[in-house]
Image (tube, rainbow, N blue to C red):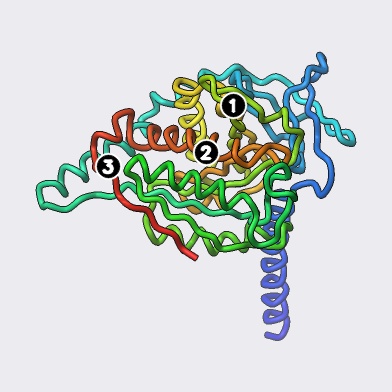
Amino acid sequence: MKGTIKGKKIISLIIVLAVLWISCATTIAEEERGKGYYIVYEEGTNKKIFSTARVLYLGDQYLNEQNILYEIVKISGDKAYAKFKERVDIERALDLPESQAMAEVFENEHDTLKISGAKKEKVIAIYHTHSDESYIPTDGKSSIPYKGGIFKVGTALKAALEKRGIKAIQSYQPHDPHDSMAYQRSRRTATELLKNTPDAIVDIHRDAVPAEEYQAHVNGRPLAKMQLVVGRQNPQMNTINNFAKQLKATADKKYPGLIKGIFYGQGGYNQDMYPRSILIEAGTYTNSRYKAEDGANIMADVIATTLYGEDYEKKIAPGGGATTK
């Protein structure tokens, strides 16, 4: 009997340690470099593909602005090398059954509620895992603990969504310090936001690479580009990836150059919590925050068009927004 009890305790301990190890490994995978960044080159040609301050792992992937998919195959110091995988037909993402499902569901619910005299709200939630992130040219520092300039970029996205008749709920909850446990802390915030049953939930960040990596003119307007991030350690990765591709396909059609790419990194980024979750890098710390806000303003139309269809503004009158603390 004692042997059986002892054996059960050992098994239980092994299970607990395994869970902790998996949790720790996932958290570490979501880390960013404390200093410096990687430059990723194409294997064989040494052509630069992109730069990133996120910690890279073998197997990470990157879909660039021209929709060419690469996979990281070698990491050496501040350099990494990626091999060509395929050229992606990004517009096919818009033909997937689920790409129009959200718009159809919303329209059907709107028609049903219209009969009863009620009104279906469009709702999008916004939060910030790295709440200290800031922009040196406008904020004076790259990091302002608990009240980074990144909140103002989220507020710009919120305001742009509200102008388009969408209820935007932004959380100003900080998740400092900026460490490997930040996503565990922000998971609680995401849980609270999801109680509002949003149509999508967005985690707004900014990158930590040179300014030129994100500088762009989109439809003749200077602004900071956006980058999407999808977690590879996520049971919903295919669904999240489809959503990310739909966002980029929409942006490529309406605002070419707005989305610089999609980074597929080791980690979860809380994207297991909801099928329409996305992490957006709004510019980098050496861009003006105003340019990031301009990019977020256009990104609002991309998100709305992707979720609700091209004529989303005609389907419902503008409504108010909300803020949570």
Q: Secondary structure at mark 3?
A: helix
Q: Secondary structure at mark 2?
A: helix
Quadrant of the rendered image containing residue 11? bottom right
Q: Residues within 10 Å of mark 1 (few under 14, many from 20)?
A: few
* Residue 128, disc: none
Image height of 171 relative to 77, above or below: below
Give me the C-alpha separation between circle 2 and circle 3: 24 Å
Task: Between label 1 and label 2, give the one nearer the viewer.
Answer: 1
* Residue where numbered disc 2 is placed: 296
* Residue 106, disc: 3
Image height of 272 relative to 286, above or below: below
Q: Nearer the viewer, residue 53 or 166?
A: 166
Q: Residue at x 81, y 49 (%)?
A: 34
* Residue where numbered disc 1 is placed: 222
Q: Nearer the viewer, residue 212 or 248?
A: 212
Tell me if I can see residue 323 in this picture. yes
Q: Residues within 10 Å of mark 2 (few under 14, many from 20)?
A: many
Task: Name the residue at the top extreme.
Answer: 45
Task: Between label 2 and label 3, give the one nearer the viewer.
Answer: 2
Q: State left or right for residue 308 relative to residue 223.
A: left
Give me the C-alpha separation between circle 3 and circle 1: 34 Å
Percent coordinates x, y for residue 127 in the rendering: 53, 54
Q: Nearer the viewer, residue 120 or 142?
A: 142
